[in-house]
Amino acid sequence: MPASVASPVVSSGADVAAATCAVSVIIVNWNTREMTLECLRSLYAQTLDTDFEVLLVDNGSHDGSAAAIAEEFPQVRLFAETVNHGFAVANNMAIEHARGRRVLLLNTDTVVLDRAVDRLVAFAETRPAARIWGGRTLFGDLSLNYTSCWQQQTLWSVTCFALGLTKLFSNTNFFNPEGMTAWKRDTVREVDIVTGCFLLIDTDLWRQLKGFDPIFFMYGEEADLCGRARVLGARPVITPDAAIIHYGRGSATKRSDQSVRLLRAKIGLARRNMRPATAEVVRWLYLVAVTVRAVGYGLQARLTGGRGAADATNWGETLTRRGEWFARASLIF
């Protein structure tokens, strides 16, 4: 676990007397000032039945986020950091100070809809043995965003991704087993992974697990956490009754940065959870996947006068940067 976060330096809300509450809402911000303010407004407006606190880590933003949050929401326990610790470490730091019986991880690029937090907490009371709970995520136009949950990767799922079968048959569970896109998130179901954008967990379980593994800067941390929790008997579950908007990529800089971090996490998770020989096959399959996409989208862009150019740039840069995610020396898992 990292050292404790520095004392909050902006918000007076950090000095409230120690007390317990039902839920500690944890938010990590990095240069998403307007989205974060929108998220907080929706959280306070839509959470009426749950006794909660908000702990927010600003990861060294340079867009005025910390000052704006402190001004509009003085009740938030704000930790204004001078560096970007990453998602995993920042959450760990904040939860060291949490007073809730449960912890809710909430992304800055989300909007709480129709009492979603109240509904998720109420659902957790009906399924206490799950110990990790999630809801339904929607895009800004209220269409379904499937990324509220996932199944863990397997050799088959990575093979489908490498060969493009996941994209060609995206709405089938057979060729897209991680995404589970044949299921519209409209029923209660146990899942392998609840995404960290809207994840409720028992605080004592979080602390038993020692939180996120800080080796994950961004991406993969909730997959690792849920996997370790399942070993201890947790059964993560999704309810359709708690819905939020999740825009996605709120803190992104460029797509290849995301792709590199995601591939590092995927290969690292394979090394942790698969036999060494299988994990090595998975590593090479991801190289095949990136190479095929870089070449394919590059050809498409040239033949169509630019169509697919953004994808070509992303995968081309990701392939060029393979030393950051493919080379053995770059993976310290």
Image: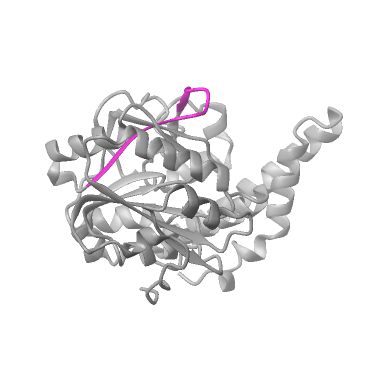
Q: Quadrant of the C terminus?
A: bottom left
Residue 146 location (% of width, % of height): 44, 32
Residue 41 location (% of width, % of height): 43, 38
Residue 164 location (% of width, % of height): 58, 36
Q: Considering depth in this image, is 154 or 301 the residue closer to the camera?
A: 301
Mark count: 0
Left or right for 307, reference 180: right
Left or right for 183, reference 30: left
Q: Considering depth in this image, is 122 or 279 the residue closer to the camera?
A: 122
* 62 shown above or below 330: above
* 268 shown above or below 244: below
Q: Is residue 101 magenta?
A: no
Q: Is residue 96 visible?
A: yes
Residue 311 location (% of width, % of height): 71, 39
Residue drawn at x 39%, y 61% as measured from the top left: 12
Residue 114: quadrant of the picture: top left
Q: Considering depth in this image, is 122 or 215 the residue closer to the camera?
A: 122
Residue drawn at x 41%, y 45% as measured from the top left: 197
Report the predominant secondary structure element of the magenta stretch.
strand
Q: Quadrant of the N terminus?
A: bottom left
Q: Is residue 281 visible?
A: no
Tell me the magenta residue range.
Answer: 132-144
* 245 shown above or below 276: above
